[in-house]
């Protein structure tokens, strides 16, 4: 497989941060994109056009995945996956919307409208049977007892359909993103691909997948550093970087790296209608409460979640963070941009929903290495 491009069918694509991690790894080709919300799909198309990336071979599909099973579109998808598998190794990747499993979310689990999408996504995978798949979701699906039971049911469904699995609760900050964000990643390979690639398994578990190879840091080392906690609010005033921290994990490093002040999305941010005093006086780094978290310039960000009244304030300006600043916190390349005519709500929602680019890119690298782990035998 060393020189062959691997085809990817993407679901719940959003603005395509997860997809971009695979695209820029260099050995994966996104051939199919499925996203329910047209505004998000428009962002996906715009960003790829600006970055010079190719249009998916099987196109963009703005449709509800819940209506896919048993439909004509499902037959077409199955035929496309089958054709793709005859030409190249083929995978399905995606992260179903997850507030029903989030600790801070609705907590309705598999019975919630979003929770049901995880089951439907599993059904699509088992129906089309790609060579491999990637399933991404919040840590609540992994750590909360009742949600974990549902997760185990999904895994058993995959095993019953010929897949061997490996899973990991990852933290994006360990891959270099300036944000502490835990997510569960489940990867499965079908028995036909396992035989073809000579992969090693034991009791339907994949052996030898190296989740840690492309980590840049460990959470233990990160947490041991003397990060600044809270500093007095100093609007438009520089403060020196503390010694002993990791500069590359600070929001200021990423804002400088992406030149966020001159980015096409630099002036896209919500204007405060009320509570201006909090924007002018709240201490830098005071992010304890869910709402009105002021970031610290010399620290990494809490999880990028910009909906449901969770407001992230600029460290030293009397405003919320901008779209360009949020993109940098998600570790996107500076060339990645959103169209300027979309709503701020759509912009921040899709940014907050996305998988940090560096985490996605490192997982893609580990996946490619695993596919080729026995190529020389």
Image (cartoon, grey):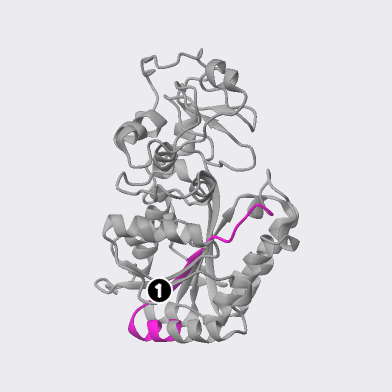
Q: Secondary structure at mark 1?
A: loop
Q: Residue furthest left?
A: 3
Q: Which residues are magenta?
A: 81-100
Q: To which quarter of the image does residue 8 belong?
A: bottom left
In front of the other: 24 or 31: 31
Left or right: where does residue 363 sit relative to residue 159?
Answer: left
Quadrant the N terminus occupies: bottom left
Q: In this rendering, does residue 198 appear at all? A: no
Name the residue: 62% across, 84% down: 70
Q: Residue 136: image x %, image y %?
A: 54, 58
Q: Is residue 96 magenta?
A: yes
Horizontal placement of 46 versus 126: left or right? Answer: left
Q: Is residue 19 above or below residue 316?
A: below
- Residue 62 visible, this angle: yes
Q: Quick one: label 1, few (<14), some, or many (20+) residues within 10 Å? A: few
Foreground residue among 82 and 156: 82
In which quadrant of the rendered view does residue 4 lie? bottom left
Q: Residue at x 59, y 78 (%)?
A: 68
Q: Which residue is mark 1?
A: 59
Above or below residue 236? Residue 371 is: below
Q: Position of residue 125 (x, y in %)?
A: 55, 75
Q: Is residue 63 above or below residue 241?
A: below
User: 111 or 280: nearer the eye?
Assistant: 280
Provide residue 352's location: percent of width, then percent of height: 52, 46
Up-down relation of residue 202 to residue 268 (above or below): below
Instruction: Please name whichever residue, 347 or 33, is drawn nearer the observer in this view of the structure.
Output: 347
Instruction: Classify the position of the C terminus by image quarter.
Output: bottom left
Position of residue 243 measured from the top left corner of the image (x, y, whole percent): 37, 18
Horizontal side of residue 89 vs 307, given as left or right = left
State the residue at coordinates (70%, 63%): 150
Is 298 covered by the magenta stretch? no
**26 horizontally vs 79: left or right:** left
């Amino acid at each position: 497989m060393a020189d062959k491009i691997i085809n990817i069918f993407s679901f719940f694509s959003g603005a395509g941060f997860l997809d971009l991690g695979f695209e820029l790894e260099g050995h994966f080709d996104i051939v199919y994109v499925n996203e329910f919300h047209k505004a998000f799909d428009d962002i996906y198309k715009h960003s790829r056009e600006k970055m010079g990336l190719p249009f998916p071979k099987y196109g963009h599909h703005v449709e509800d995945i819940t209506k896919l099973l048993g439909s004509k579109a499902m037959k077409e998808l199955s035929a496309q996956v089958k054709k793709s598998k005859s030409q190249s190794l083929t995978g399905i990747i995606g992260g179903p919307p997850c507030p029903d499993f989030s600790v801070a979310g609705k907590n309705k689990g598999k019975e919630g409208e979003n929770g049901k999408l995880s089951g439907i996504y599993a059904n699509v995978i088992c129906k089309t049977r790609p060579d491999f798949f990637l399933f991404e979701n919040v840590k609540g699906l992994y750590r909360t007892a009742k949600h974990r039971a549902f997760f185990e049911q999904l895994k058993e469904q995959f095993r019953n359909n010929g897949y061997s699995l490996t899973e990991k609760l990852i933290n994006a900050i360990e891959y270099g993103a300036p944000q502490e964000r835990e997510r569960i990643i489940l990867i499965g390979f079908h028995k036909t691909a396992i035989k073809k690639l000579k992969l090693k398994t034991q009791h339907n578990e994949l052996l030898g997948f190296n989740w840690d190879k492309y980590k840049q840091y460990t959470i233990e080392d990160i947490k041991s550093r003397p990060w600044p906690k809270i500093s007095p609010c100093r609007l438009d005033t520089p403060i020196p970087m503390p010694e002993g921290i990791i500069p590359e994990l600070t929001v200021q490093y990423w804002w400088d790296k992406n030149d966020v002040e001159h980015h096409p999305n630099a002036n896209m941010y919500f204007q405060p209608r009320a509570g201006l005093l909090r924007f002018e006086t709240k201490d830098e780094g005071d992010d304890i409460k869910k709402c009105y978290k002021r970031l610290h310039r010399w620290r990494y960000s809490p999880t990028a979640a910009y909906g449901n009244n969770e407001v992230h304030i600029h460290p030293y300006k009397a405003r919320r963070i901008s779209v360009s600043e949020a993109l940098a916190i998600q570790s996107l390349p500076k060339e990645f941009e959103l169209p300027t005519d979309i709503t701020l709500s759509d912009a921040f929602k899709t940014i907050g929903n996305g998988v940090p680019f560096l985490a996605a890119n490192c997982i893609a690298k580990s996946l490619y290495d695993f596919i080729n782990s026995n190529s020389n035998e």
